[in-house]
Image: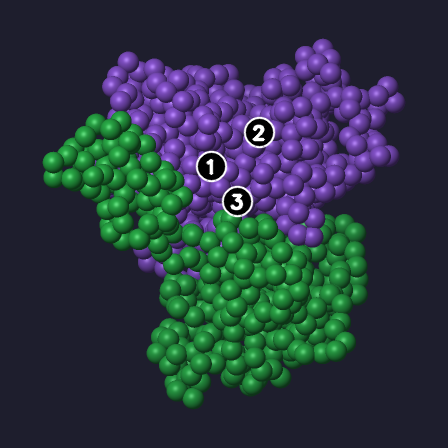
Amino acid sequence: MIAPILRISPLTTIRRHRELPIPGEVVVRQGQQVEAHDVIAEAQLAPRHIMLNIARSLNVSPDKADQLVQRAAGEVVAQGDLIAGPVGLMQRVVRAPKSGRIVVAGDGLVLMELDTPPFELRAGIPGTITNLIPDRGAVIETTGALVQGVWGNGRAEFGLLHTQLEKPNSHISSDQLDISLRGTILLAGYCADPGVLQRAVEIPLRGLIFSSMDAALIPQARQLPLPVLVLEGFGFHPLNTISYNVLAKAGGRQVALDAAPLDHYQGIRPEVVIPVNTDMPPGENIAEGIDFAPGQQVRVVRNPHLGATGEISTVFAEPMRFPSGLVAPGAEVILKNDQRLTVPLANLERVL
Amino acid sequence: MTSSIVATDSVLTIDVGTAHTRAALFDVVGGQYRFIAAGTASTTIAPPFSDVREGATRAIQQLQAITGRTLIASDGSLLTPSLPDGSGVDSIATTLSAGPDLRVVAVGLLQDVSLQSALNLAATSYASIVETIHLNDRRRQAERIDAILRARPNLIIIAGGVEEGASHSIFTLLEAVGLASYLIPKTHRPLVIYAGNSAVRQQVKDALGAIVDLFITPNIRPSLNSEQLSVAQPDLAKVFKTLRASQMFGVSDLEHWSEGRLLPTATAFGRMVRFLGRLYDPQKAVLGLDIGATATTIAAGLQGELILRVFPQLGTGEKVNRLLDHVAAERIVRWIPDETSLARVLDFLANKAAYPHSLPASEEELILEQAVAREIIAAATREAFAEPPFDLPRAHSEVLPWTEPILLSGSVLSHAPTPGQALMIALDGAQPTGISTIVLDQNNLLASLGAAAEINSLLAVQVLESHAFINLGTVIAPVGIARRGSPVLRIRVTYENGRETKSEVKFGSLAAIPLPSGQSAQLHVQPLQRFDVGLGGPGRGGRIRVAGGALGIVIDARGRPLQLAKDPAQRSQQLQRWRAALDK
């Protein structure tokens, strides 16, 4: 069975594709150094148009109106600029109600696209533009620590990490958040308190990273103007030891938090990147083999052992029966405390 | 290579689902088509492969290993046609459900008429409606254009204008579609299906043909009172293939392997159910339920007519938590015998959405998963039959139509640890009425057979009658109102050996009468208190011959709609009692 991969690494080379959802304009060049907040591409995601009925406004036939239009498709116009006319005794004219661009004209009508601010795609992580994706974006490469999670609310930020995670099974409550955290990205444990999300906005924090969170908070977290990342899952789950060892030491460092929603089709996961300046960048962690095999570090992705990490000792040749009665391919996993678990392969992901 | 019955012997089917790709082999054994074996591999849409061929090849390799039959040549190509040494296969058919929802803008003249038909057509595929436009939506033309642009559709379905009716109004809507499409870069323009008044086809071509890839189908709403979605389904399937080929590497190759016989899984599933609907009792619909990771598909076939509804928001996979848009979480909680908090169910759904392919290893997880499956089936059947496009006989509008048989497909059912659990999920979720045979598609073959039916319809029938499917049992579910514990049904079973058993069924009970697979029995059913079992009206009984199954004859007299006790302790006992009744 092909092993899905969860990336948790204290130092690795990270390459990320950043692409607009629709074609637009790429505003960086290959080899350029970018900061997390730098815009790399722009596109008009929510255009606004207006239809000007020239024939009706000038009280002429559509054919006549077309002759009176003074602007060609693609022409940029400012508010008040002449669009069509003059005509008649009163020298009637049609002027641009707002600034914008003529899109198309005909049948006595003019369609104008109004000026609206474009959507700006930001780099998200500091690094080097290694490749351009024409009309869509770029590939950015950086070096640093990487910790991926399981859920994000779709926002991204870059800022100073403050850790409030004394141990992997810590809880966070709203009374632990004060103004001294203003502008930081907070790493905390299990969150079941809606007040935490509310306080994060009031202070305001720049981002939230939880080891786990109650699913009842998802609607609130989705509405937050700052990124929220859940590393392990929903319900109480301590942070796995591999992620804990990477993140607990990163307090006071600048981190890039990309709380992208999981996209199974494109292989996108929410993640935290902690950039590291080094003269000797490591290579990208490449998986050897694609199937589960003994010796691989794995994480259990489903209850009753969700979040447990360990090493595969055996991949069983034949499907096996689990306590639920279900028969499926499985493996034995040895945890750090030497506990042995038998887990369906479908409930494992490889940690790389 | 031809596709005739004579020339075609063996058939390989490939089904690409969100989680798994399955390859199944069918061949003639003893003069009958039989399912030989299936291989399964992970679907490889996502990185590192990002190519569906890899998963298909792995599934075929597993099939090779199981059967010992060489299907892939040394150069990696598929061996077709079969060779005298037994290697290779004669024909290939492919079904595909994996992939993101199609983003559909539905356009119609009147909201309740043609727009509804456009929405109904979209609902026969893996579509998510991202915008609707109709004449009375009160928006200016430029606002409609902006709405289409913001929606970023893959597909626009336009319906409107009954045959020989007014047609001019449609041009206002076509203008919005045309201008919006013109403003989208060519590489990202939506495909457009026009399924409206046929009198203006040429004008539609003139208006849109140069801007978008346009598919013109017969009118899906030829009159105010009639809707014919089936006429547009071949084009919708073409659109689906075209879009998937542009979204996912390898789809074009699968289409080539199967000589153009790639179908959306739901379409193939529907085709199979429609086909069976012609063969079975004309007074009852053949019902197919496919509970997949991508979507739940409901198909009902009756005398050649088909109701097909695909619910992408009701899959067991990454969108499983969208079930909460359809039902309150409390409805899921009520199926769990032990005290479980609402929070636990919400956490379960969110974790399952993050890891849609994970499996329930513990009993607690299995109970949660099956509780969710019950509510998915309930929501899908409720919505599919709320306003059926043609008359389906049933006891009353609040219950499922009379059905025979009911075909169950999907991993949550086929992987249930016992046949009894699979049957309970279906009984609790779909709540069938009357007398129905429940058949489990344990190898998830139904959609593949629907695709293969194009090559050879005999194959589909013969495989369906083989042991590739499990007959879970014959369910008798009387419909009516009575006091709990009062008798509502008398049953006499006469076995092949002449032995007879008689029983009186009390309202609220659930019980199984053994009748092993391979045996049959004569069943005499007499409803009491004007209960209805679908044998001609309330209180009317009769004799039928029933085939044996895993659970035999199951008498579900719990009432329709099913009522669960409100008190948690009583409900827990109730659930445990029901589970024990079919614990096999």
- Say which residue appears at 33% left-offset and 50% top-offset: A77
Residue at the image position 40 percent from the left and 43 percent from the top: A74
Residue B542 coordinates in the image, percent (x, y): 39, 19
Q: Position of residue B110 (x, y in %)?
A: 26, 30
Which residue lies under the disc numbered 2? B263
User: Which of the two discs, 2 and 3, labels the residue nearer the N terminus?
Assistant: 3
Mark before the other along the chain sequence, 1 or 2: 1
**Residue at the image point whose x is 57% and y is 59% from the top:** A18
The reply to the same-chain question for discs 2 and 3 is yes
Three-letter code, disc 1: Pro
Q: Name which quarter of the figure residue A84 lies in.
A: top left
- The quarter of the image holding the C terminus of chain B is top right
Disc 3 marks a residue whose amino acid type is Pro
* Measured Cα–Cα span from mark 2 to mark 3: 16 Å
**In x, y percent, where is residue A47?**
37, 50
The answer to whether residue A95 is seen in the rendering is: yes
Chain B display color? purple
Residue A173 % position (x, y): 42, 81
Residue hosting label 3: B100
The green chain is A
**Front residue of A242 and A318:** A242
Tag 3, which secondary structure? loop
Pointers 1 and 2 in contact (C-beta within 8 Å): no
Q: Name the residue tied to disc 1.
A: B190
Q: Chain of mark 1?
A: B
